[in-house]
Amino acid sequence: MGEEICEVCGYRSQLGGVEKRPIFPREIIEQAGITRWQVISICSNCQAELNKWYALKVAAMAYDAGMQRFSYKTSGQMVEEYQAAFDSFTGYKKRRSQENRPG
Ligand SMILES: [Zn+2]
């Protein structure tokens, strides 16, 4: 078993703490019928943070001002939002690691 590196935080593990996972939650892949998705090596800490990030950033419902009611987003909209949330998560983690660097 080789060394795996978390692509988000740079954590290295030879003990299986870093896994290759799709960036989208499993249920979104299934609901949206996505056949191609990005896969990253991610550690369990970053995966837990990413799950929380998605819970904060992506909502299944949207307020439709025209209809004056909440409605479910389409799976296409959901995929776009998860992609945008993933990009903002990696951007956030990059900024954090730069702030923590001495000097
Ligand atoms: Zn990580």
Image (tube, rainbow, N blue to C red):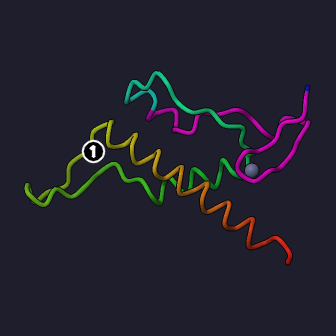
Q: Nearer the viewer, residue 7 or 26?
A: 7
Residue extending farthest bottom: 103
Residue extending farthest left: 67
Residue designated by label 1: 73
Q: Indicate the position of residue 50 as horizontal and vertical percent values.
A: 60, 52
Q: Nearer the viewer, residue 45 or 35?
A: 35
Q: Is residue 38 above or below residue 59?
A: above
Kindly identify the residue that appears in the image at 75 percent across and 53 percent down: 9
- Looking at the rendering, the stretch of residues picked out in magenta corresponds to 2-28
- Left or right of 54, for residue 47: right
Mark 1 surroundings: few (<14), some (14-19) or many (≥20) residues within 10 A: some
Q: In this view, does 46 lie above or below 100?
A: above
Residue 18: quadrant of the picture: top right
Name which residue type carries label 1.
Lys
Q: Indicate the position of residue 48 as horizontal and vertical percent values.
A: 65, 51
Kindly identify the residue that appears in the image at 26 percent across and 54 percent down: 62
- Look at the image and say whether residue 52 sits in the magenta stretch: no
Q: Indicate the position of residue 65 as horizontal and vertical percent values.
A: 13, 61
Kindly identify the residue that appears in the image at 25 percent across and 45 percent down: 72
Please identify the quadrant where the C terminus is shown: bottom right
